[in-house]
Image (cartoon, rainbow, N blue to C red):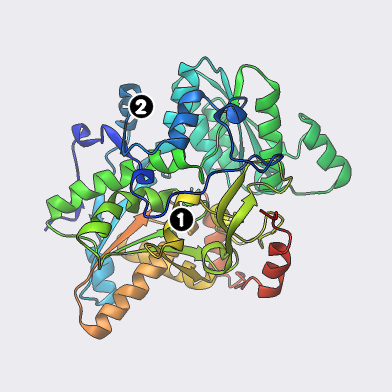
Amino acid sequence: MRTKILLDEEDIPKRWYNVGADLPTPLDPPLNPATRKPLQPQDLEIIFPKSLIRQEASTERWIDIPEEVRDIYRLWRPTPLFRAFKLESALKTPARIYYKYEGVSPAGSHKPNTAVPQAYYNMVEGIERIATETGAGQWGSALSLATCLFDMECTVYMVRASYDQKPYRRSMMRTWGAECIPSPSDRTESGRRFLKEYPNTSGSLGMAISEAVEDAAKHENTNYALGSVLNHVLLHQTVEGLELKKQFEIADDFPDFIFGCVGGGSNFPGMCFPYIPDKLKDHKEMRMVACEPTACPTLTKGLYAYDFGDTAMLTPLLKMHTLGHDFVPPGIHAGGLRYHGDAPLLCNLVNDGLIEARAFHQNEVFKAATTFARSEGIIPAPEAAHAIKATIDEALKCKESGETKTLMLSLSGHGHFDLSAYDAYFDGLLIDYEYPAELVRQSLAKLPQI
Ligand SMILES: *Cc1c(COP(=O)(O)O)cnc(C)c1O
């Protein structure tokens, strides 16, 4: 049995899998925020290319991956599937643990899997520049890479707090030729308004989204791109799971569990959605577990309801698990997991009981990350470490019961830009935070009435 299960470049999928074709319960449509009626494709054309709008609403099971996109995927795909022999012996578990590592992409995470096709479709429709927001900096760097490879411009509104605290993500974006602006900025009307109202603000994802959308809406040659949550993003991420199925065939094994962390919900659905038809048909026992922080417990404590995607209440209303659009998560160190909502496709399947969710505290998550780094070598992104924690828990259960289950972990990225968070953990400075039920109730009281 090999440690790494590798595929050839020809094994990079030729089509993405759209789980929208196989949902037991149809997806509730996104609503126009003004009329509260189902959104029309034209409503989105001011900021998105037509091809992505079509993918967003598509219920076709398979969608061709353009050859130009596969050609760029070749730079790091197929990604390796590892058998975690060393972690298994460290835990003394009879379970077989596997992880698929997306940290081998140039940006260090799964996010280029969607950044590349998004840049491509915009380029084909004549768009010259893409504006976006970034919180922790991972999405901003992925989109900077993708636009650079298609000779496009990129403007990234980066939440002021991370702009100051994570200078190296910013350096990456500059290296790939993007312009990175701390948000709120004086570039946009909404930015100037935020600055006037809150002169000392350290920014928020909600504010940065408003700035990027405004920039895209006001410039003919500019569109907007989102790194998670939307259907077309999850579609693009299925390259992960489609490769994974081939790799498990080579390993002559089948996952009993798939674990993945959820911020907006893209790396985890990308890994497990291609198994949804298997689960619906033959392998009813297979379990898919979404892992999130107790400080931002969207799937475990949120309500399944229509809500806005941003704080300024400008985006379409999406049916999703939400903590409320004005929910302000505490400053935990897994920056990529601090979103108040989650992808509608993922929430639909959670609501139908096909996918389950668990929440974890930061200290236990960093402990699991350290165990992983000290056995497998890779220093994981704090986001991905939530899935490691869940995997280790399950492996220890197997040790007690003596069961030889197959556990599959989505390792969404490396933690090379998060080492100050590791230092905070080693120095005992991390605070475990359970978001108070009362505050969740207050935020949820402000949901739009549909
Ligand atoms: C952004 C990010 C996440 C969270 O986003 P999802 O859309 O839920 O996948 C998780 N891990 C890494 C490494 C990220 O960069």
The residue nearer to you, when weighing 256 against 319, is: 319
Task: Inspect this view and state whether residue 107 appears.
Answer: no
Locate residue 298, reporting x and y percent. Answer: 56, 62
Locate residue 286, reporting x and y percent. Answer: 27, 65
Q: Residue at x 19, y 41 (%)?
A: 7
Q: Is residue 396 left or right of residue 390?
A: left
The residue nearer to you, when weighing 177 against 315, is: 315
Mark 1 lies on a secondary structure that is helix
Locate residue 27, reporting x and y percent. Answer: 47, 49
Q: In the rendered structure, which amino acid carries the disc numbered 1?
A: Asn
Name the residue beneath numbered marker 1: 348
Quadrant into which the N terminus falls? bottom left
Q: Is residue 130 left or right of residue 26?
A: right
Name the residue beneath numbered marker 2: 69
Mark 2 lies on a secondary structure that is helix
Image height of 32 relative to 381, above or below: above
Q: Which of the 4 quarters of the picture holds residue 433?
A: bottom right
Q: Which of the 4 quarters of the picture holds residue 355?
A: bottom left
The residue nearer to you, when weighing 192 against 92, is: 192
Circle nearer the N terminus (1, 2): 2
Q: Nearer the viewer, mark 1 or mark 2?
A: 1
Query: How many other residues sit within 10 Å of disc 2, few (<14), some (14-19) or many (≥20)?
Result: some
Quick check: marks 1 and 2 in contact, CB under 8 Å? Answer: no
Image height of 278 relative to 219, above or below: below
Locate residue 45, reporting x and y percent. Answer: 58, 25
Q: Residue at x 24, y 76 (%)?
A: 93
Image height of 227 relative to 85, above or below: above
Disc 1/disc 2 C-alpha distance (Å)? 29 Å
Q: In the rendered structure, which amino acid carries the disc numbered 2?
A: Val
